[in-house]
Image (cartoon, rainbow, N blue to C red):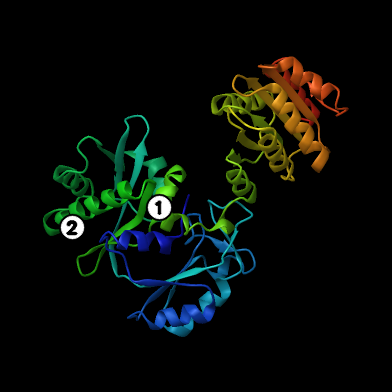
Amino acid sequence: MHIHEYQAKDVLRSYGVPVPDGFAAMDADEAKAAAGKLPGPVFVVKAQIHAGGRGKGSFKELGADAGGGVRLARSADEVREHAAQMLNNTLVTVQTGPDGKQVNRLYVEAGSQIDKEFYLSLLVDRATGFTSFVVSTEGGMDIEAVAHETPEKILTLGVDPATGFMPHHGRAVAKALGLTGDLAKQAGALAGKLYTAFMARDMEMLEINPLVLTGDGELRCLDAKIGFDSNALPRHPDIAEMRDETEEDAKEIEASRHDLSYIALDGDIGCMVNGAGLAMGTMDIIKYHGGAPANFLDVGGGATAEKVAAAFKIITADPNVKGILVNIFGGIMRCDVIAEGIITAVKEVGLSVPLVVRLEGTNVAEGKKIIEESGLNVISADDLDDAAQKIVKAVGGSN
């Protein structure tokens, strides 16, 4: 689960992490009032969406010359003017895609004099099991270009969970940032506070870009992006309350309510599979035969007919879906349960696109019989390769 920048800074502030003062605003008047609470004379007005590249983005309704999603203002009235332009309009960035995201809230922040920008993040390194710092002296809006063109300028420093954060980790972060003296001490202390927050709040990713050196010689987190482990949210009800469902795909929200693992993709072949590995393999073979999956969907090993029906409805709710592939290998999951769920869903929502079903495993004969006797227009497949070829052909793919 991701949260907005202003929420991330509230979390970090509670751990003593240095961040600029600022206030969230939901309308232009509230933005102007927020500026009145800050010292000035420079303010920063930031669009709050779950996507990066806001500063270089542009608003669909305003044109490229109107300014992006991060703007400077030198008076409270100018803050209000920017806010009125940005709110309820669609911001397009390199991470939103061409459709963009509507800006429903802003963050008005005190301006900072910036002498130097750095990059600092923490994430879970799946290969080592460590929490790792990712550090670069080249922070700012072009960090993606740094990663692509000069990857040697990005360093990774792992922290063994058996020891946790130690003073030498802080010194290593400071060295990687090229800092000495008092700034090195600041960097070490900052790294320790970020690590503490990361572990205490079950974060999956914490990104500070940029971390800045201000004109008065202070390190400050000028931006913050946090992603949390959704499985740990029951331990953090205050974090769960920060969820902004307007920033998420409606189908993914519905899937989470039914305990389904669903991720929307850009293709046109809907997939319903049991097991994450089998789901990945199914998407791969669809691509191999020239198709494009519209989603990742794992119904799990012990799904009920109701859960399967919910999964089918979520797939058909995607207007981009031109065909559906159901691929079930029954172990704990019984093929007859899958068949009953499919029939229930089709009767409720109808079937207007080709449907290919491949069933194998527990109660496969019963499952196939249920579908055959249902009168549904279903294309049966003998194995996964056969199923992929048939659905790609049915939707007019290159196979």
Mark nearer the N terminus (1 vs 2)? 2
- Disc 1 from disc 2: Cα separation: 29 Å
Residue 54 visible to an observer of this rendering: yes
Q: Is residue 18 left or right of residue 304?
A: left
In the depicted structure, whether residue 119 falls above or below residue 28: above
Residue depth check, mark 1 versus mark 2: number of the one nearer the observer: 1
Is disc 1 placed on a helix, strand or loop? loop
Image quadrant occupied by the C terminus: top right
Q: Which residue is mark 2?
A: 186
What residue is shown at x 35% (from left), y 50% (from top)? 201
Is disc 2 placed on a helix, strand or loop? helix
What residue is shown at x 75% (from left), y 29% (from top)? 340
150, 316: nearer the viewer: 316
- Find residue 74 and report its horizontal and vertical position in percent: 41, 80
What residue is shown at x 42% (from left), y 62% (from top)? 7
341, 161: nearer the viewer: 341
- Find residue 4 and report its horizontal and vertical position in percent: 46, 59
What residue is shown at x 32% (from left), y 68% (from top)? 20
- Packing grade of label 2 (10 A; few <14, some 14-19, many >=20) is many
- Mark on residue 236? 1
Q: Amino acid at mark 2?
A: Gln
Q: Is residue 220 left or right of residue 341?
A: left
In the depicted structure, whether residue 86 falls above or below residue 231: below
